[in-house]
Each structure stands twice: as structure tokens, then as C-alpha cells.
Image (cartoon, grey):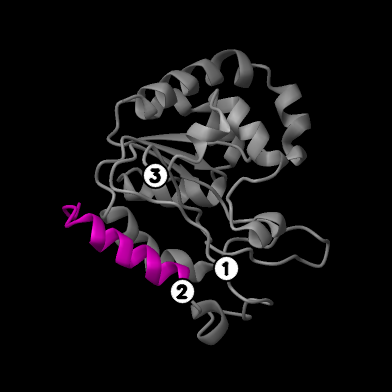
Amino acid sequence: MMALSSRSDLDRLAADIRACRICVERPDGPPLPHEPRPVLRVSTSARLLIASQAPGLRVHKSGLPFDDASGDRLRTWLGMDRETFYDTSRVCIAPMGFCFPGYDSAGGDLPPRRECAAHWHDGLFARLPQIEAVLAIGGYAHRYHFARLGKPLPKSARVDEIVRRWREFEGSTPRVFPLPHPSWRNTGWLKRNPWFESELLPDLRAMVKAAVSD
């Protein structure tokens, strides 16, 4: 892993990401259907990284990640208040797709843009060697961060299957903790899987508390 050079090095890269227009000007597939607005929050001091999927429309408009009902549910899962969640000195947030990808024909969010991981992610995470815990939310984040850890997942692995195996990944550095997306669309799954609240969440909250404590 690349050694951290300086805070200014990370700041320069983050500024380049926020100014990115690759998926409009040199897209890998259909261009982004609106103006880019990359969303990320990073620092050289935070030990917890939230690796999400991609911003939704509300976040695209506000520029604040998880500023929606999914964010409220995620903060409940983590046992974390908004002040701590948005304290960049303690929590980094870097989605697999930095921009809202638009909607598909059924009105659902499109997958994260491939351009982000291809052009930015390896360099970004190499500049965050202090990260101790990665909360990988959703299948795209699972596949990328476990591969980066040297534990690639089978292409056929489903989010449900990986989340159920969360205990197997304890002891890795950084620890990658797989989570489903906190969307309302997963409410039924959460009700059918009470172990998520009774067994997984206490483990998650203990890890998060350790990572954000001074």
C-alpha cells in the first residue's frame, strides 16, 4: 500500500475528483445524463470509511452524503449521531460512484458509474492508509473492497450471502464489514432476518465506536 505523502496530497486528489467530468466528456458507455456533482468526504485522520454505492437525487442536489431517509437508518445501525457522522476528521465517506448515476427505465437508480473506480479509487484509498474499518455498503462496494483486501469474492456472491458472513472477515487490516443498503427497499429483508439487528448490529456498533473514539 502506498504510504501517505501529506494532507495536501490527499486534498489535491479530492479536489481533482470533485472537478471530474470524465463520465460526461469521455464516458465508458452512455454519458451521465446531467451535470456531474461528485460527492465525497475524506481526511488523513479518520479511521472509519463508509464505502457506499452512489448518491441519490437528493444528495446530488444537496452535496451532503446520506442526507436522506437511508442516512437516518444507517446512522441508527451505527449508533451514531449526525454530528459525528459528518465529522470528516473521524469519518470518511467515499462511494463507489461519486455522482448520482440517473434513473433506469423502471425509475430505479442506475448502477454506480464504472469510471470512478477505474480512474480514482485505487489512488484515493492508497492515500488513506490510516483507515482501520471499512463499512462496505452493497454489492459494488463489497466486490471492490474485498478484492483490494486480497479476498476477492465469487462473481456469483449475493449481498445477502456476504452480509451473513460478516464474522469471517474479522481480523483483516483494515476490517471490511459488509452491509446491505439502508434503503427502504430492504425493509422486508430486515424483517425476515432478525439476526441482523440482534447479532450483527452490536458487533458493528462496537467496531464503529472504537474507530471513531479519540
Q: Residue 27, image x and y in percent?
A: 54, 81
- Residue 155 appears in view: no
Q: Which residues are magenta?
A: 1-19
Location of the C terminus by quadrant is: top left
Q: Residue at x 61, y 21 (%)?
A: 196
Which residue is identified by label 3? 146
Identify which residue, 194 or 75, lies in the foreground: 75
* Distance (Cα) linking label 2 and label 1: 8 Å
Of the numbered discs 2 and 1, the one sitting upstream in the chain is 2
* Amino acid of disc 2: Ala
Mark sitting on residue 7: none
Residue found farthest to the front: 83
Within 10 Å of disc 2 (Cα), the crowding (few <14, some 14-19, many 20+) is few
Which residue is identified by label 2? 19
Q: Secondary structure at mark 3?
A: helix
- Residue 142 appears in view: yes
